[in-house]
Amino acid sequence: MSTPLSQSKTPFQFVSRPQKSALVAEFIGKQLQELRTPALVIDRAVFAKNCAKMHANALGYGAEFRAHLKTHKTVEGTRLQLLSDSAMTHAVVVSTLMEAWEVVKSSLVSDGIVKDILYGLPVAINKIADLSELWDEAAKNGAIIRLLVDHPKQIEALEHFEKTRPVGRKWSVFVKVDMQQKRAGVVPGSPGFESLVKDIHASLGVSLYGFYCHAGNSYASISPSEASSFLSSEVEAVNEAARLALDLISGWSSGNRPRFVLSIGSTPTAHSASAETRAQLQSLLYGTLELHAGNYAMLDLQQLNTGLIGRESISQKILATVISYYPGRGANGTDEALCDAGGIAMSKDTGPIEGYGEVIGKPWKLGRISQEHGVLTRTSDSESGVLEVGSMIEIIGQHACLIAAAHPWYYITDSSSDLGNQVVVDIWIPWKGW
């Protein structure tokens, strides 16, 4: 008899990571100009300010906040996301099991900083055993693991797995709601939605915690009012899901109805959350609101284009070196240059702002990229701003999440300190792997 995928289990493998102590000894106190490029630099003061602002947004909107860790994937960044000058939260969402394990194995859970971990993909059946072990480990310090589901087979697999345990448990799950973007989830009111809700209600191994959505299309926002409309759409989607779920289950009488968590958010819509946008909600809510976001702590050109942030809020940049120069080679006889930051260092994501990155303080952009190098092109016909071969430039890229994923560690500066933002004050080492 074959073993169900949910029972096939191998020990979770941690990848070898650089030792922070050695990196600190080597780089703390160095000027940015002394670093090998390409290098990812984060201004800790700006990062922390962004976290405080997001907590304030959630408070004004009357929502709890769940921090997504996928952009930076570090212990240090997580602490800043959860403990800010504005508020404190204990809930996170992760995109990989590696992130979840590192959160649990670090001091974040044992110190009581993280108490609620959501694995942010519809649960894969072959990961259930590993998630169960993770839950056992997290529970030692009072933390819980929650899951996303969007298919009855996932419920069936969770139930089957719990029957193999000496003492069964109930998994706390969000139903992932598809806002017609066809990324993941089920559409409220569809046959698949009804089947899933009924299966969860009948299950002895799963309990319905709430409904979760993400307006990925909100990245196309170009104004606060447009982002606010996407936020309202998120609320409407999860609230309609909760209403339909209550109507589907006759056993949930009016006096015994569960109070679902309605989890909404993306960085653009979370930026638009405020007391004013909350006042615009007209519908009766069938649950309590939870706001989630992740990119907001670092930000990038994609977020800048939304009109919801200023350049001063972007906390990350890439250091690159000009390695060659080509007078008159570009369009209309303009100059071009070559730098050592290509597709791996910058990602190949694009956005409404043209190019793959903007050079800070200079009339240049990263116009074309190959794997390990990029071609710098002019953004102005002015003869000023010639780049010197061997000089270092600073680039803001399109998408901080994918940029950060390529770098083995981040150099941390702090513009609020006496050293300013040109001296390394810390090293953050991200969690790598799935």
Image: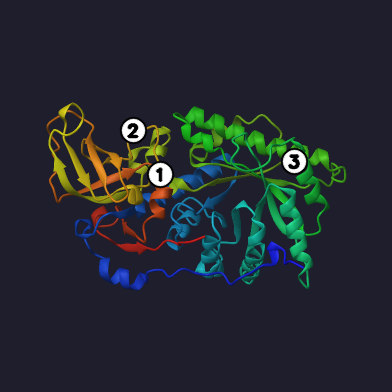
Label 1: few (<14), some or many (≥20) within 10 Å?
many
Label 3: few (<14), some or many (≥20) within 10 Å?
some
Where does label 1 land, which residue? 399
Where does label 3 land, which residue? 192
- Marks 1 and 3: which is nearer the front? 3
Residue at the image position 31 percent from the left and 46 percent from the top? 370
Query: What amino acid is labelled 3 in the image?
Result: Gly
Query: What amino acid is labelled 2 in the image?
Result: Glu
Residue 316 seen in the current view? no
Identify the residue at the far front of this view: 1
Q: Which mark is residue 354?
A: 2
User: In terms of depth relative to the viewer, which is nearer, 363 or 309?
Assistant: 363
Q: What's the distance in space between the residues labelled 1 and 3, CA to CA?
A: 34 Å
Mark nearer the N terminus (2 vs 3):
3
> Dots 2 and 3: beta carbons under 8 Å?
no
Label 1 secondary element: loop
> Dots 1 and 2: beta carbons under 8 Å?
no
Label 3 secondary element: helix
Q: Position of residue 190 (x, y in %)?
A: 74, 36
Q: What's the distance in space between the residues labelled 1 and 2, CA to CA?
A: 13 Å
Q: Position of residue 63 (x, y in %)?
A: 60, 44
Q: What's the distance in space between the residues labelled 2 and 3, CA to CA?
A: 40 Å
